[in-house]
Each structure stands twice: as C-alpha cells, then as structure tokens.
Image (cartoon, rainbow, N blue to C red):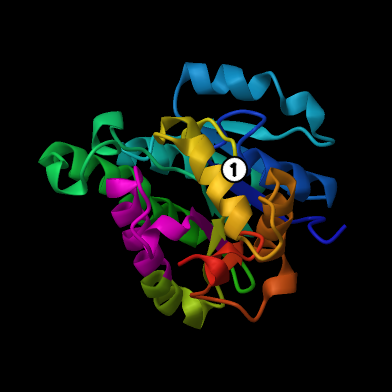
Amino acid sequence: MIMKDRNTFIAGVANHRSIAWSIAKAIDATGGRLALGYLGDREREGIEKIVDQLEGSPMLVHCDVNDNDSVRAAFDAVGKEMGHLDSLVHAIAFAKREDLDGRFKDTSRDGFELALGVSAYSLNVLTQAAEPLMKEGSSIVALTFLGSERAVPNYNVMGVAKAALEASVRYLARDLGPQGIRVNALSAGPIKTLAARGIKDFPEMLRTHAERAAMKRNVTVEEVGQAGLFLCSPMSSGMTGDILYVDAGYRFMAG
C-alpha cells in the first residue's frame, strides 16, 4: 500500500481506456486517495460511469486549464478537502484535427497556439496551483510521446507541443528541486485511447510499432499505469527532470 495516506490530483481522465484512468486505478489499488479534474459536464458524466471500479471514493473537481480562475478554484477545493497533495498527473493534450493531418508547415497560427497552450502551458498552470499544497517528496508527472523527438506521420503540431511539454518538465524540475518536489514525464508507446483516434492511420502506427519494438508487441495501458504509479510514488524519489519510456523497446529499434 505504497500510496496509503498520499493524495493525487489527476487532470485528464477521459474514459476507461485512457492512460490517466489506468494511473488512477493503480494509485487507488495501492491505497492512494484521488481527486479527478474534469473539463465540463460531459467529462464529469463519463467519469461518474466508471468511478465504481475504484476501491476509494475520488473527489471530482471542475478544472478548465484554459481558465486560471477555474484552476485556482479547483485546487482551493482540493486543499480544503484533502489538506495537501503528494502528486499531480498532467494528462491533457489537444489539437485541431486539421492540424494533425497533412503537412506540419500548413499548421494554422490559431491551431499552433491552441495545441501549445492546452498541451504544454497547462502544465505550468497546474503546477502554479498545486505547488502551495505540496511538500518535500511530492511528485509531478506529465504524459508525453516519442513524437516529441522524431517526426511521426500525422502527429505534426502535437509532436511540437509534446517537445515543449518535455522542455517544461526539465525547467520545472530545476525550479522545484530545492523544495524536494520532483517533475518527470512518462512517454508511452501508442495505445488505443480516445485521443489516439484523432491520429490518421493510427492502426498502421500500432502495427509498425509492434514490428519494430524489441519485445515485438505494443505496451498495454495497464503497464503504463504501473509506470505512472512508480513516478508518483516514493519509489522514484531519486528521479527528476527525466523521461520514463514505456514502449516495449521501440525507442531503441526505430529508425
């Protein structure tokens, strides 16, 4: 029960197939208490349909990362209910569908700013609100993807946003290190999530990944959830500013 008496805020649970949900289940199964941030009524309804799978009763909090007042209100509520936070999981990303298809050079200005704002700057927004609730030994985890390092077909502006997110992780790790707060990223291989459906030819990406990976398969969402648990827990106490890859060995095999 490594997460017993430890509180975690997870922003970005979409449905039962999401990586954020897998991390939530792993934390819940090891005794952790959860606060789940949702964007709107539709997202809240989706979470309410699956929370009975958890052993504990999570706190559901409205949190729109595009609205600073909403974020402040969310963490004020978490502070009053939980008292403190031991970990924060950033699982938020968005880009216009038209900016994922075609050529990256055709990305619209509005689309670029939207993708970078929602997918990368939001980590700063959440960290600013979470920091007063955290103490030495706390952990912040952001979800990323290999498209930040390599030009992945049909990932385009999201790859640039993930690169910005990873750079943010390193700078935040430097900022918060003196306080004993760790900041890391978790890079998973392709997984069949709701977000992945927005990537053109995603089934081909899955097939290629499995063929080239050292383990000759794709990772499961449960495996990524366990990795997220590791980064949130004291087991990763010596890691900060790092990226943990869970991709069945694809990063070392891909050309």
Left or right: residue 165 versus residue 208 is: left
Residue range (magenta): 140-169
Tell me if residue 85 can be seen. no
Total numbered labels: 1
x and y, in percent, of residue 244 in the image: 59, 68
Seen at 76% across and 32% down, the residue is: 57
Seen at 40% across and 70% down, the residue is: 172
Report the front residue among 54 and 185.
Answer: 185
Residue 245 covered by magenta stretch: no
**Quarter of the rendering occupied by the C terminus:** bottom left
Secondary structure beneath disc 1? loop
**Quarter of the rendering occupied by the N terminus:** bottom right
Residue at the right extreme of this rendering: 1
x and y, in percent, of residue 82 in the image: 66, 46
Q: Is residue 219 above or below residue 95?
A: below
Which amino acid, by three-letter code, is at mark 1? Ile
Seen at 70% across and 46% down, the residue is: 220
The residue that disc 1 covers is 191
Name the quadrant containing residue 136: bottom right
x and y, in percent, of residue 219 in the image: 68, 51
Report the front residue among 243 and 122.
Answer: 243
Residue 158 covered by magenta stretch: yes
Q: Is residue 178 above or below residue 34?
A: below
Tell me if residue 10 can be seen. yes
Using a 10 Å C-alpha cutoff, classify the residue at mark 1 as few (fewer than 14 neighbours), some (14 to 19) or many (20 or more). many
Left or right: residue 106 versus residue 211 is: left
Report the front residue among 9 and 184.
Answer: 184
x and y, in percent, of residue 55 in the image: 85, 36
Left or right: residue 244 versus residue 173 is: right
